[in-house]
Amino acid sequence: MLVEKPLISESAGELERLRDLAIAKGVACYTAYNHRFEPHIVRLKAALDSGVLGKVYLAKFFYGNGTARDVRNSSWRDQGMGVFPDLGSHLLDWTLFLFGPPAVDPEVWRSSHFENRASDHCQFGFRGTSPELDFEMTLLSWRNTFRCDVFAELGSAHIDCLCKWGPSTYTLRKRVLPSGRPLEETETLSCPDPTWKLEYDHFLRLCRNPSTNIDNDLWINGVFNKVRKQMSR
């Protein structure tokens, strides 16, 4: 079974039962997060795993599109947590992929309703953990925009744009002590968005060797429930 993100529920028990059922039946149950297959996100993951950046201090993400009016005109989309389940679910999946689950609870720093009934601009993150994580998402970025900046002991890594909006650029900077101009490597991709096919191929492999990623959904769902309480205050 292939499920479009996000797979959420007010009760973790529902997701646990779905996971257990898939395991018992020996079938694949997979929630799609195609952005995990962004070539530059994969490059960033490889850099983090290699240790080339040393201790990672802070990761900042901005994810914005200009769909506020479309969402406002949709009776089912402009409700609840608004932008958070749509764009925030990708941000949380990237967190799991790149860094693993933070050891602290999320904090909502801003949740605004500029044009929409539900939140159309939100900032949240995880402080007091390593690395600290800072996320911003919006439906009010009239030019679709994605940025990721990772600041670390031995350098930094930067992604500008997703492949679907292209061109997408990845830059790795290696620190020169005490404060020199860093050594820099940059790669730019202008190819069509490869993530959908890469994820579908991944799902087909799971079907041949059935497994599930519902444990990811359980963590994301738990974050959603904690954020929902903060946004409703």
Image: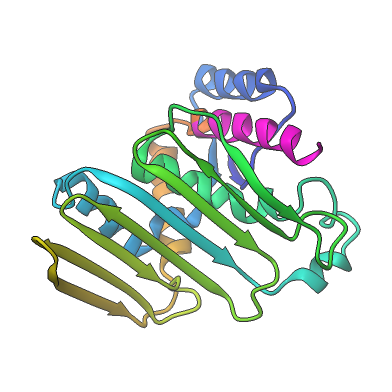
Q: Quadrant of the C terminus?
A: top right
Residue 157: % across, % down: 27, 62
Name the residue: 61% across, 47% down.
5
Q: Residue at x 18, y 52 (%)?
A: 53
Give the left or right position of residue 101, taking residue 12 as reference: left
What x and y, as percent, mark residue 136? Answer: 57, 57
Coloring applied to the structure: rainbow
> Which of these two is toward me, 194 or 91?
91
197 relative to 5, above or below: below
Q: Residue at x 49, y 45 (%)?
A: 93
The image shows residue 62, relative to residue 133, as above or below, that is: below
Check the image and name the residue furthest to the left. Answer: 177
Residue 100 position in % (x across, y down): 38, 35
**Magenta span of residues:** 216-233
Q: Quadrant of residue 220?
A: top right
| Figure quadrant of residue 148 | bottom left
Task: Check residue 231 for magenta coloring.
Answer: yes
Relative placement, left or right, of 98 versus 172 is: right
Task: Give residue 101's position: percent from left, percent from top.
Answer: 43, 32
Image position of 173 (left or right of 97): left
For the point 43% across and 27% down, which residue is it?
Answer: 103
Q: Main secondary structure of the magenta part?
A: helix
Quadrant containing the N terminus in the rendered view: top right
**19 lies above or below 190:** above
Q: Is residue 12 magenta?
A: no
> In the image, 121: left or right of 69?
left
Q: How many marks do you count on the picture? A: 0
Q: Quick one: 220 or 232, which is closer to the camera?
A: 232
**Looking at this view, is 107 or 97 the one in front?**
107
